[in-house]
Amino acid sequence: MEDTMKRIQSTCNFCAIDCNLDFCVENGRIVRTIPTKGYPVNDGFSCIKGLSLSKQQTTVKPDALPKIRQADGTMKEVSWEEGFQHVADKLKELQAKYGTESVAGISTGQLTLEEFAIFGHVMRNYLQTNVDGNTRLCMATAAVGHKQTYGYDAPGYTLKDLELSDTIIFIGANPVVAHPIVWGRVRQNKVPGHKIIVIDPRKSETAMNADYWYGLKPRSDLKLMYTIANMLIEKDWIDHKFIEEHTNKFDEFAAFVKDFTLEKGVEATGLSAEQITELVNLIHNGKAVSFWWTMGVNQGYEAVRTAQSIINLALMTGNIGKPGTGGNSITGQCNAMASRLFSNTTCLFGGGDFTDENERARIAELTGIDVDHVAKKPTIPYNMIVEGINAGKIKGLWILCTNPRHSWTNNETFAEATKKLDLFVVQDIYDNIESAENATVYLPVVPGIKKEGTYINLERRLSALRQVLPRGENEISDYECILGVAKALGMGKAIEKWETPRMCFDMLREISKGKPCDFSGVKWDELTGSHGRQWPYPEGREAEFADEERRLYADGKFFTPNQRANFMFEEPLPNPYVPNEEFPIVFNTGRGTVGQWHTQSRTKEVKFVEDVSLSKAYLYMNTKQAEENGIREMDQIRVYSVNGQNADFFVKITDNVPYNQLFAPIHYIECNKLTPSNYDKYSKEPNYKGGICRFEKI
Ligand code: SF4
């Protein structure tokens, strides 16, 4: 390598794996991207998305300035000072006129830890209003499930467990496409005779590569888990010692699942008695059984209880806290874990309770704000923000690094909302995302390769985002943008401790002290170019926590008041969208290809996507269904959804989608035009995968 070339290690800011990458920079340009060798997560590997991050050098407009909508409808470029003042003045004006909660924010699991925190400080503390994140769309279910079961939102596993498990069970998860590094770790599993099992209505790419695939009826997963639990208890294939010493409410749970007989399980799931029995046997015969779920579970109408029904199986068989085990949630976005604990939305910074006076006083002192200005209650959830705008109660919205016009469920409701706002601030690296169409203010910020901060991945590992490229004269980060508005609001002393991401990081380290997520021992400089660090990592006890791949719950102690995990269960609810005469087909959704990311605003950065995916919306249809309707490959159909909307899709024909289902990739705006406004009652996560529809050939 030439002397002039610098090699800078940073973190990929697409998915929750948080791969580390070495960027080779020459003359202010990235000339090569190499997955970091020896990094415990991805050790020299990555997917095409990370390798393509350098494309942001050309796809993101350099040196952009804010724009403000004028009376004639045009957008006018203004200075940063003018942009900050305009946003601050409008926020204050709307609050004065319509009340404190007439303005709101929507943040995202794509920002850095420090950026969530400062946004939560400005909006939730200082302005005392509501902010939710697009984490609500993917991980809210896991977060609520963990809190109720473990007493804290603490996924206990480490990715190494994928290599140590002899029975790996994926439920509603398709890592081959969605989490390629997770799948890579599975492929590195050297345990003799290990088995890969997939439970999914669709024969996904992961199911195709598994040893066993259980193609159950959509939304019958909760009943399947209860049936399995009942059979394990009946056969006495449970870990009595672990249950006795480390759990609560097992006897009630055992009595509850008694009614979930094999016969009923067969009827509910569409699986045969032999299949369910085989699955129960596989769980029993495994010495280190791990259960892994993601969006197929999280995005349902009774998702929290379903996630917990999976954890129940891990608890009752003692498959938790030991190598290769766990009831494990695979997170979606690069920093979803940080947003769950440090965005000041559903909990105080670090997972505290809004009603805990001692914690409020501590937060006030550490963040420099008056205690009366520490947020007093959890935010209203995402759906209530959108509904609040449509009802005329919320007049101002500030969205950051997210594209709800595309990603929100039943997304026409968001389109409608944007037309009703007096202030609609869109802060993003691109000004052409669908959500920006009706923006009244656009704030251009730099991409991850030009900023610094911290991410926390799916296994609780903090890793460093470090600035790879120099910035142009007008270029600022999300952090600096929020700080600019904060100063224009006149926050004064309340923002003095927040001058840089590094100061914010140190503040959060201090806040985390004594909590399950304690990362006070992680130092900013030490994180740079490191192997990352999983929480907990308390200051003064570094030697105790030196192992680079650690799991929680090895001692059988959880975060509930009596340190025991709770068996959580409930009578399954009736499915709100059962296929019927008018809408006979299930409308399932999910990730399309490994190169595509969410709403595709950043897909333009990813090489080869055009070669492997379509530019227009498409979906998958079963071969028999297509034949019966005279549909050939790449014919177009119009799909009518139960939510009253319709959209057109090209058809790809496959036997991997069941006869009475369609499967639509989420990367096209048409997909969430058709998903319903229906939510899990605890997590308020949308039931994205639960719609029903009919179709006609165009
Ligand atoms: S998208 Fe995920 S798997 Fe791909 S490089 Fe980035 S962090 Fe790694």
Image: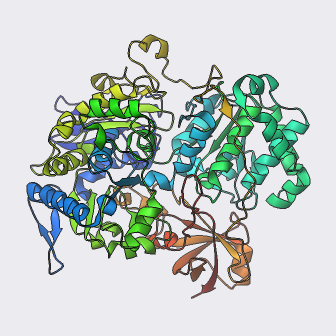
Q: Position of residue 670 (x, y in %)?
A: 48, 73
Foreground of the two, 11 or 484? 484
Residue drawn at x 74%, y 38% as measured from the top left: 313
Q: Quadrant of residue 464?
A: top left
Quarter of the image with the C terminus in it? bottom right
User: In terms of depth relative to the viewer, which is nearer, 538 or 190?
Assistant: 538
Name the quarter showing ligand 1.
Answer: top left
Colour scheme in the image? rainbow
Residue 377 at least partly seen: yes
Residue 418 rendering spot, x and y as whole percentages:
33, 72
Q: Quadrant for the N terminus, please.
A: top left
Image quadrant where residue 251 sits: top right
Q: Establish if 358 lies above or below 567.
A: above
Q: Is residue 194 above or below residue 398?
A: above
In the displayed orientation, state which residue is furthest to the bottom: 698
Dividing the picture into quadrants, the one containing residue 500 is top left
Pick whichever, 44 or 250, lies toward us: 250
Residue at point 46%, 51% (across, down): 135
Q: Determine if residue 22 is in view.
A: no
Q: Position of residue 480 (x, y in %)?
A: 19, 45
Q: Is residue 390 left or right of residue 329?
A: left
From the viewer's perspective, tell me whether residue 317 is left or right of residue 641.
right
464 horizontally vs 41: left or right: left
**x 91%, y 36%: residue:** 235
Tally of marks: 0
Horizontal and vertical percent for residue 19? 42, 38
